[in-house]
Image: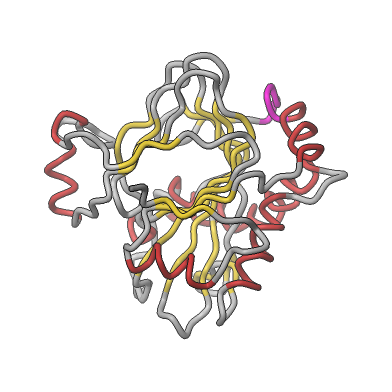
Amino acid sequence: MTLIRRTTARQFSHEDILALVEGTALGVHIPGFIPPQALASAREQLLDHPDRDGLSQDTAFKRIGFAYSEISDEASRDQYHSEARANIQRMRDLFSPYASPSDVFRALVEETWKPGANLLNINGRKAFIGICRYQDKDVDLNPHTDALERNLPAEHSVEQLAQLSANIYVNIPQTGGELELWGTEPGEDAYNELKGERVWGLERELLGPPMEVIKPSPGDLLLLNPRQIHAVRPSGDEPRITLGHFLGYYGADRPLALWS
């Protein structure tokens, strides 16, 4: 029995988001989220785009935009927020004349989650959303978790009760690129033990087999809980290109926060 809920953008519901928060689902899968014409246009522009740069933590991974997880000091924090709006527009321009899938996703979440949704706002500075990420051939995205508080300002109080992620798939390799989900959420101490000698990510041999393995198709949207251990198998031929988004949950009666 799969723990992945399958739905459509039209049928996507408040309860789908709540199922991820409460742990009754490992993922919510919306096939064909990007219309075929927009997908074809995006793939043509993005496959060999000259603006993609190496991710700060590991230059084997490329991206267009600047990820919140790359913040390591006040200079990079200032850079992230000062470039946020320009990077949102940059992604809109890449999908023109079609709607940016990240904009469509933002509207869908705002309409679907009963209290609404807003861009993450840290001390009066809004976040960027819609980063484009590349995982090239033979690059392994090791098992890991994602947590907003690892990059928050030291003085910022953390009220977030859960964190979700939403990936929109622009290109998927013919071989490889499967998403692995373990369904376990280690605390920071346990996470650091599972790292072994690694600088980033976890040792696969310490984890056992994943609970679910899923391979989305180009154009799909998949939501999951990134505080649970997950990984992506290496691409065997073409690059794996996704648009990445995070959602912060602060309670059933409060708006979600959105960022990349």
Q: Position of residue 58 (x, y in %)?
A: 41, 30
Q: Seen in the image, is 78 located left or right of residue 145?
A: right
- Location of residue 30 in the rendering, given as x and y in whole percent from the top left corner: 58, 50
**By what rule are the colours in the image chosen?**
secondary structure
The rendered magenta stretch, by its main secondary structure, is classed as loop
Q: In the figure, residue 62 lies in which quadrant?
A: top right
Is 244 placed left or right of 248 in the picture?
Answer: right
Q: State the extent of the magenta-drawn residues as a range.
A: 46-51
Outermost right residue: 97
Between 45 and 27, the residue placed more toward the observer is 27
Residue at 60 percent of width and 45 percent of height: 31
Q: Is residue 47 magenta?
A: yes
Residue sticking out furthest to the bottom: 253
* Residue 24 among those drawn in magenta: no
- Residue at horizontal 53%, vertical 14%? 237
Outermost residue toward the front?
1
Eyeballing the image, is 114 above or below 176? Answer: below
Image quadrant of residue 174?
A: top right
**Residue drawn at 50 percent across, 27 percent down:** 135
**4 with respect to 66 (left or right):** left
Query: Residue 251 placed where, x, y %?
Result: 40, 80
Pick the residue in front: 122 or 168.
168
Rendered location of residue 75, percent (x, y): 49, 51
